Image: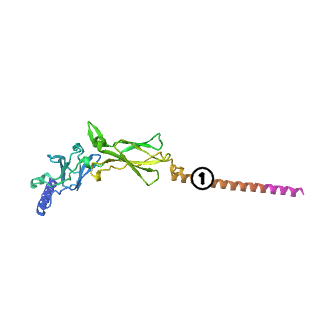
Amino acid sequence: MFIAALGNVAVLALALISAISGEDYPPRAQNVAWSSFNFKTILTWSPKPTNYSYSVQYSRLGEDKTLHCILTRETECDLTDKMEDVRNTYTADVISEPLPSAREDIVELPYTSAPHFCPYEETKIGSPKFKVVQNEDKTKMELHIQDPLTAIKRNGRPVNIREIFTRDLMYKVQYSKAGSTGKSKTQNHSNVVEIKKLEEGVSYCFSVAAYVKSRKSQNQMGTWSLPVCWPPKTPSFFEEVSWYVLAGGAAILLVILILLIVTIILCCKRARFSKQLKVEGALGTTTTAV
């Protein structure tokens, strides 16, 4: 009881100090920003709350706002499921909520508004997976690209980026000879991209990224994939075997060589000693005969 009362007094004191100093109690959220990857959209802010909490109000632009992540002690709110209409523009406020004992002294809860956000225009697009298929014509290869899945679900299944961007979606491909720094580029609306005029018998490395031309320039390109080289470069013996294995093998060979040298020396000494005994034996027999 005493501790709870003391806490209430502290909250009231903070509210009074805030009113006198002109500062907000509880403090407004700062650094409010959107984070969105493959349409998984999270609103983030700071600082971590102490004796207060946060709530988030969101809406489509121009519509009534709805509360979400109510009285949270976290500094993020997942709004993915609230933004399934990805072409719309959304707005959100992060409201700072005091403890119940201080509510009656606050006329308006302090809040911070997030920038307007449109998932279709602003979500970051992840790198696609793809495989390289060698054409019968050795100077051609095909890249079979898999559309990345998104966090948006329809009828209980996640939809891919092509279902959202439709004809706006293209794929850019950059490629080069394995080990070369120079790169060539091409692009295509299709999930199958044919690369022509390649040198027969040469290994090429390919990277792929989604591209949506209708978006603003800073958001047009998705993340580039890791390079895939085809035909796979045959690794040398030293690339296949680790340095630890080589060092261990060298040590074993060195031990065998030392043992071999010691054995040869011992054998030579034994042979010399045996020969000496035979000579001395022969000399001893001759002297006796005289």
Disc 1, SS = helix
Q: Is 94 on the left or on the right of 167, as rendered?
A: left
Q: Nearer the viewer, residue 21 or 14?
A: 21
Instruction: Please state the horizontal and vertical placement of residue 132, each as a whole percent of the image.
Output: 43, 43
Which residue is rendered at x = 80% and y = 54% of the image?
A: 278
Tell me the amino acid under the disc marked 1: Leu
Which region of the structure is painted magenta? 277-290
Q: Nearer the viewer, residue 28 or 285?
A: 28
Does the image show residue 281?
yes
Q: Is 275 on the left or on the right of 62, as rendered?
A: right
Q: Residue furthest right?
A: 290
Instruction: Please state the horizontal and vertical placement of residue 63, each as a whole percent of the image.
Output: 15, 46
Residue 289 magenta-drawn?
yes
Q: Is 48 on the left or on the right of 141, as rendered?
A: left
Q: Quadrant of residue 105?
A: bottom left
Residue bearing mark 1: 253
Instruction: Please state the horizontal and vertical placement of residue 114, each as a whole percent of the image.
Output: 20, 53
Q: Nearer the viewer, residue 202 or 69?
A: 202
Which residue is rendered at x = 78% and y = 55% of the image?
A: 275
